Image (cartoon, grey):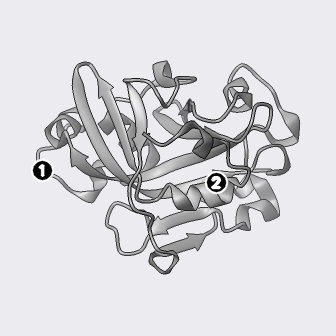
Amino acid sequence: MLPAQYYLHADVVWLARNLLGKTLCTFIDGKLTKAKIVETEAYEGVTDRASHSFGGRLTPRTKTMYQEGGIAYVYFCYGMHYLFNVVTNIENIPHAVLIRGIEPLEGIETMLERRGFETVKPELSNGPGKLSKALGINKQINGMSLFSDIVWIEDAPTIDDSDITASPRVGVAYALDHAEWPYRFRVKGNLYAGK
């Protein structure tokens, strides 16, 4: 597993880049799944209009973001999808990284079953709602430690900067000029990373 100190890094943008290539793992309903993280987005807390915690917003939903880094922040989006985020930084600095795309590595049959797919294709897990369903992630994971035996992230070689694309985040037009910040990171050429 990644060490606890890793999640306390002060720079959430650095973490969003560095998480690319790491292995996101779940052991849910007795089934192990593992996948390489290939797309992320950084959310920089109270100063970031795109963040749920912008301006110090503290609600029953956002309180998870204010905890010490190294836990999961899972929320329901559009009444349809669970989105999985990694909480980072020290307590009361609500930074988070949204995991947007994963490349399946282990437990692929389980992922296919959960998604209702017969064959492996990028649509299996090339979006935040898709990957949560494939990995069995739901609201019960919200606030869970990333050092548990249910959800965790394993270290893997760092992706070279030359193999990473940075661009504006998706679906945050309400954030005005902050929507243009290049806080979305993708592994170049990976079919499981969005376009």
Seen at 72% across and 19% down, the residue is: 60
Circles 2 and 1, Cβ within 8 Å, touching? The answer is: no
Amino acid residing under circle 2: Ala
Which of pointers 2 and 1 indicates the residue nearer the eye?
2
Amino acid residing under circle 1: Thr
Residue 103, how many percent across, how many down?
A: 31, 55
Q: For the residue labelled by badge 1, is the local secondary structure a helix, a strand or a loop?
A: loop
**Image quadrant occupied by the C terminus:** bottom left
Q: Which residue is mark 1?
A: 119
Residue 162, how many percent across, how many down?
A: 49, 81
**Quadrant location of residue 129?**
top left
Q: Nearer the viewer, residue 168 or 135?
A: 135
Determine whether, in the image, residue 75 is placed left or right of residue 105: right
Q: Number of numbered discs present? A: 2
Determine whether, in the image, residue 178 is placed left or right of residue 29: right
Residue 190, how many percent across, how many down?
A: 34, 68
**Image quadrant occupied by the N terminus:** top left
